[in-house]
Image (cartoon, grey):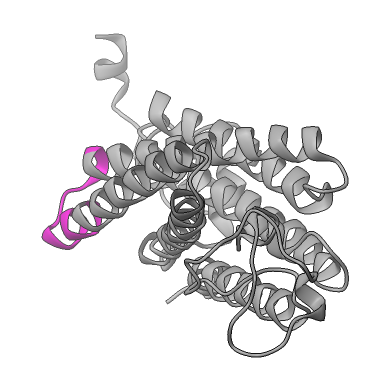
Amino acid sequence: MSFWAILPVSLPAFTITGIWVVYAMALYNHHVCPVDNWLYNQSCEEELHLQSGSTLCCTLENVPLISKCGTLPPESCFFSLICSTGSFMVMVIVFLRYAHVIEKHQNCVLNTAGLSTGWICATGLIMVGNFQVDNAKILHYVGAGVAFPTGMLFVSLQSALTYRLAKTQGEYCVAHLRLGMTLLAFIALVLSGVFFVQESFVLQHASAIFEWVFCVIIMLFYGTFSFEFAGVTGDTVMVLARGGALGPNGRGHKAESLGGPISHPPESMSIL
C-alpha cells in the first residue's frame, strides 16, 4: 500500500474533528446554543454568556451554524487554521486524483472538470475560514457561495468519473458508495439552503443541522480516495511533468526512461 493512501483519510479525520472542537469551544464560551436546542426567542433579557443552567434563552444570533461557531475568538483562530489547512489538503488530494487518472487511464473532460472544481472549492473554503461572518459578511458569503456548490459539483463529477473508469467489482462498489454519498450530500445542501432563508426558528436550526451533515458527508467522500491512492507512486506526479498520460504513447516513454527493452517493428512493416 502506498503512503499516499493515508492522505485522503487524514483529511476527514482532521477537519471533522476540528470543526467539532470549534463547536465545543463556542458552546463552552456561550457563543452558540447546543445543536439539540430547538427553542428560540425573539430576544432575551440577558445575553447568552450571562445565562447559566440547562435552560438557555437563545435567539437567531446563536444558531449553531458552522460559520457561527467560528466567528468569535478564541474559536475563530482555530476555525481559520482548520479551513486553511483543510483547503491545502483538498488541493493536494484533487491534484493527485487528477494525475492518478491520467497515469492509469487517460485524461478526459470529467477529470479536468474535477480538478477545476476541486481547486475552486478549496479557494472558497479559504475565504470562509478567514473572513468571519460577523466581521466580513459579504466576503464570507461569497466564499460559502463558491465552496458549497463547487464542492457538490466536485463529488458529482467524481462519482460519474468513478463509474466511467470502473472495471472490477470492487471499483463498482466504490462507485455505488460515492453515488450514495453524493445523493445524500445534495439533499442536505438543498434542505440547508431552503431552510436558511426562512424566518422560522425551527427551520433555521434545521438548516444548521443539514449544513453539518453536508460538510461531514463531503469530507468523508474525500476519504474514499484512499482506495485509488493505494496505487499512487512517485511516477504519478511525473506523468504531469512529462506532459502526458502513460497511455499507448506514455508507457513506452516510461519503459525507455527506466532502461527497459523496447520492441521496434521490422523495417518492412514500418514501410507499410
Main secondary-structure element of the magenta-colored stretch = helix
Residue 182: x %, y % from top left: 32, 47
Residue 86: x %, y % from top left: 67, 60
Q: Residue at x 66, y 79 (%)?
A: 21
Where, quadrant-wise, is the C terminus in this rendering?
A: top left
Q: Answer left or right for 86 relative to 222.
A: right
Q: Residue at x 35, y 65 (%)?
A: 227
Instruction: Determine which quarter of the picture holds residue 31.
Output: bottom right
Q: Give the magenta range.
A: 164-175
Magenta stretch: includes residue 136: no
Magenta stretch: includes residue 168: yes
Residue 63 vertical placement versus 52 (above, below): above
Please name whichever residue, 246 or 229, is drawn nearer the observer in this view of the structure.
Answer: 229
Please name whichever residue, 236 or 268, is drawn nearer the observer in this view of the structure.
Answer: 236
Farthest top residue in view? 272
Residue 264 in view (yes/no): yes
